[in-house]
Every structure is written in structure tokens, then in C-alpha cells.
Image (cartoon, helix red, strand yellow):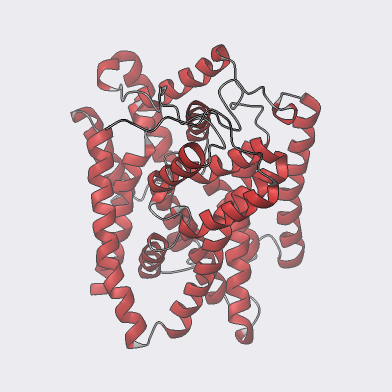
Amino acid sequence: MNQPQPPISPPPPVSLKQAFWYWLKLGFISFGGPAGQIAIMHQDLVENKRWISERRYLHALNYCMLLPGPEAQQLATYIGWLMHRSWGGIVAGGLFVLPSLLILIGLGWIYLAYGHLPAVAGVLYGIKPAVTAIVLFAAYRIGSRTLKNAWLWTMAALAFLAIFALHAPFPLIVLAAGLLGAVGGKLAPDYFNLGGGHGKSNRHFGPALIDDETPTPEHARFNAKKLAKLALIGLGLWGGALGWLCANYGWDGALTQMGWFFTKAALLTFGGAYAVLPYVYQGAVEHYHWLTATQMIDGLALGETTPGPLIMVVTFVGFVAGWSQVLFGGEHLFLAGAAAATVVTYFTFLPSFLFILSRRTVGGIHSQQFEIYRAIDRHYRRRGGCHSKSGGIFCVSRILAEGLWRRAG
């Protein structure tokens, strides 16, 4: 049977209003983690709507995978920005997160206000075994792809022991793994070569609004003044918000510490949410005591069942922290939880927006320039120790193990 021929003309231009409704819809259907979310956007934006070509889509994805933060949300932000400038990026990235924020605030309220009821507790008990199976399957799937030899398996095991038995700080584990991977890549490259990222594609679905030969839009070209201006705006958005919290609640106030802690967490999210969750666990559970290990597992369970990036589990962490700290008095527990959840989400995702909006540009890149980014991508992937997702997901097992142990006790 003959394959249908691709269209010969590009689709009509898309307004920001039309894009708004698509990004809003995506925010509610973006289940399945980054792989599922990237696949949904590919099917919609590359194959069906033809807003962007296959090659430009993969170029953007490769760039987003080099950055700390959730790559699917950053990819949506990037495409929105490329199509409709800064507001397009803000709308796309914001709507990717907003539905999950509201849903998790609602679930957090049900969890804390009614979690003692048998019906609600039963739902949570039913979800957690499924989430445990998901994490174990993810460990198997990612481990089978990235842990290609005994050296890498040993590094993953050592990372698990360091965080589980020695309670070593997570950033130190990542740094040590990166250094070992860099040395191993020099001395024994055959053992530390994990392969490349998303390569070139010859698939063609017809002319796209942003096609392979579409000139780079003016707003996406490098401009030192615009970059400096955006850096100042970003610093103001971060420093102004943190300064306001400090002025009103003090540096040691819970909301201020949440802003500072989740800023650091946002800059450690190389390798996805599974890689940074151990760091969040160490800080939120063991250092600040904002929530218990059991509540952290429950948050992971709820995060797996909602749309949006898995890192949105930090929203639940913030809600529980604000509620348990009684920030605004016993009569305003929901307000305290919602405020803390919003603060945590803001500081977690602000760097992602700044990274994308300050980019000048991968979308309309010349082949020589793009090969530089491809070389950087290959460099990261050849340093097996830097593939923090595979080690991090084993560290997440520690969260599950400890929480389940305490639940059993």
C-alpha cells in the first residue's frame, strides 16, 4: 500500500492565541515523563501541525538536553519562544507546568486534610506499589541503556552506597562521578563511551512553519545588549523574590530557605528528576525536616500520576512543608501550603526559562555551529560518570526503601 504523499505547502501562520490553547491542552495531557511528553510534542508539532520541521525539532531537543532542568518543558518553552518571541516561550513553558501545579496543590490539600480517612488512605496504598514498580522498571530500562560494563555498574553501586550508607551530600556524589567519568574517558574511552544523542533524521512530513531553511528570526539572533538585559531581568526576578521573602520572613524563614534550596536544586537537575530527587530528599527530609520520608514517597506517587514534569513532585514537597510549618497560623493551613508550593515551583523553574529565553539560537543554526553543540553533547555522553540519571535512579530506591521501612515500622 502506497504511503500518502506529504503536503507541498506550509500550514497557515499560527497566532499566539492559537498557540496558547495548544500549550494549555498539552499541560493537561503531558503524562508519561519526558519520553512521553517529547513524543506527544513531536507527533503534534512536527507530524500533524507542522509548526517545526523534524530536523529543527531534534536540534532544539539536543540543546535542551544539555541544560539543567526538565528537557520536555524546556523544549516547549524553546519552540514557543522561537515562534512568538519571549511571551510565546513564557506561555508555552508556563502552561506546561501550571495545570500540574494546581492539581498537586489540590491533591496535597486532600492528602493532608483527609489522608486519615480509609478511602483516601486506601488510594495512596494502592498507588505506591505501582509507583515502586515504575521506579524499578525505570531503573532497569535506564540502567540497561547506560550501564554497559562492570565499571559503570560499579560506579552506580558506589553512588547508591554513598548516599544510602554514608549519607554523603548528593552534589559531592555527582561531582565525584563526573570526575571519575572524565578520567575514565581519557584513560579507557572504550568503557566510558555511552553513544550519542538524538542524531540527524531524514524523515519529512512536508513544509513546516519553521522549516530547515527558514531564516533565523530577528529575536533569535545573538545580541549582546539583549542578552545582558535579560540577565539583569532574570537576576532581578530571582533576587527580588528572594529578597522580598527575606525582608518579610527573615533569612531563616521557611519560605526564604525554600527559595534558596530549590534554586540550588534547579541547577542540579542534569539527567532529569530521578537524578535530583535524592538531593531534594536529603534537604527537605533530613536537613530541614519539612516532611517525613513516608510523605516524600506519597509525593512521588502523586507526582507520577499527574501531568507535567516529574520534578513537579517538589510542588507537593512545598505544599506539605508550608502546611506542616503552620506559616500563617492554624486557621490558614491551605494558604500556607499553596504559598509554599508556589514559591518552590517558581524557584525551581525560573532558571529553565532564563536558559531558554537567553539562547540565541539553535533553531536557525548553521551546520558548523550546530556541530559544536553536537560535540558538547557527545562529550557529556562519553563521560559515563556524568550520566547522573542512571546513578540517581538507584538513589531514588533509597527513598523508597527508607520510607517503606518506616511505614512498616
- Seen from the viewer's position, the closer of residues 250 and 223 is 223
Please state the horizontal and vertical placement of residue 251, each as a whole percent of the image: 68, 59
Image quarter for residue 195? top left
* In the image: residue 241, left or right of residue 130: right
Please state the horizontal and vertical placement of residue 70, each as a whole percent of the image: 49, 45
Please state the horizontal and vertical placement of residue 390, each as a whole percent of the image: 31, 40
Q: Is residue 322 above or below residue 110?
A: above
Please state the horizontal and vertical placement of residue 143, each as a whole percent of the image: 25, 39
Picture residue at 49% right of the left edge, 66% below the top: 316
Picture residue at 69% right of the left edge, 47% below the top: 16
Q: In which quarter of the image is the C terminus?
A: bottom left
Image quarter for residue 193? top left
Picture residue at 59% right of the left edge, 80% below the top: 333
Q: In this view, does 394 lie above or below 308?
A: above
- Seen from the viewer's position, the closer of residues 74 and 257 is 74
* In the image: residue 409, left or right of residue 263: left
Picture residue at 41% right of the left edge, 37% below the top: 174
Instruction: Residue 171: tell me if it is visible.
Output: yes
Instruction: Residue 252: tell me if it is visible.
Output: no
